[in-house]
Image (spheres, rainbow, N blue to C red):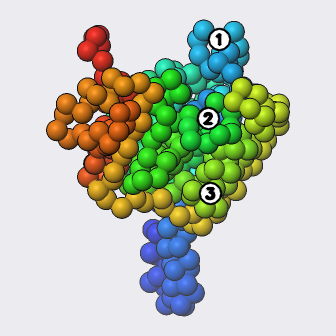
Amino acid sequence: MQHYIFPYLGQRLFASRFALLTLLFTCCAVSTVAQQTPRKIYISADMEGIVGVVTNEQLGPQGFEYQRFREFMTQDVNAAIEGAFAGGATQIVVSDSHGNGQSLLFEKLPSNVLIVRAWPRPLGMMEGIDATFAGAIFIGYHAGTSNPQGVRAHTLSSARLTDVKLNDRSVSEAGLNAAIAGHFNVPVIMVSGDDVVVKETKALLGDVEGATVKWALGFHSAATMTPQASYILIRDTAKKAVERIKDFKVFKLTTPVKLDVSFKNYRPSELLSYLSIIQRPDSHSIRFVGKDMIEVSKFLTFINNYEPGLEP
Ligand SMILES: [Zn+2]
């Protein structure tokens, strides 16, 4: 559309009879073109906060319900895609950010999105984001590890980590990933998951749009919507979020960024403390100071992925 506006108005500009009127049209056209600049939305998709997910049975290839719940994860993501496009998004990148990073049934996503798959990747659950994006949406997210409530509440690894802090504040994955988005001046505009992650994320980031698809009863239990209901809710919430995209604040940390990680076990902190860039404030914890969130994200990816037996 925008290619036709300027040549048409250019001819009219020289017709004196319509010069003033055309000038007004030109101004309108400029603002129309401004609105038509690409509006890129980044969608990071996790699984614990997908409709119906309550235990490990839905969360990995060993679980008896995993294959079915890949469908529901894909549906929740498709709902966000449909809503975001309806709200004015022009390009969408989706990152498959749970477990093995290969949970989404990508043949069931529309042809006009790109999908980031598998690990490791330097920006983790936010790989592929950059300063050209207008907003980030978190689908299927869960509360952080320091929250006593929330279905499958953890940060990065429920088996290995007991806390992750940025600049002295415990963060959830939503907080961590909002800070990565914030590095690029991209605001988080929406989160979906249980009632706890929606509340926790709003407390950290302010008035982001929230789609509560289930209500936590415990670490492994919830009252949940059906997939049909979550589809409608997520689609409508994503649409609203993109429509009011100018309202959202960027979550930007002061630099350098101090990262504190606490492990469940002794040896990770002991071995990491051999490196001169690492401090060990207590037996189970390490501290790393990165020049920005990119360094911090790469460091987190390293400590959560490195092992000497890696092949290939
Ligand atoms: Zn997660």
Q: Position of residue 75 (x, y in %)?
A: 69, 30
Describe the element under mark 3 as helix, strand or loop. helix
**Placement of 2 over or under 310, stated as above or below:** below
CA distance separating discs 3 and 2: 16 Å
Label placed on residue 63: 1
**Placement of 297 over or under 66, stated as above or below:** below
Q: Position of residue 133 (x, y in %)?
A: 46, 52
Q: Amino acid at mark 1?
A: Gly
Query: Which residue does the numbered mark 3 point to in the structure image?
Result: 203
Label placed on residue 277: none
Q: Residues within 10 Å of mark 1 (few under 14, many from 20)?
A: few
Point 24% across, 33% down: residue: 273
55 left or right of 184 in image: right
Query: Which residue does the numbered mark 2 point to in the structure image?
Result: 153
Residue 81 appearing in the image: no
Point 20% across, 41% down: residue: 277
Point 68% across, 15% down: residue: 57
Point 26% across, 26% down: residue: 271
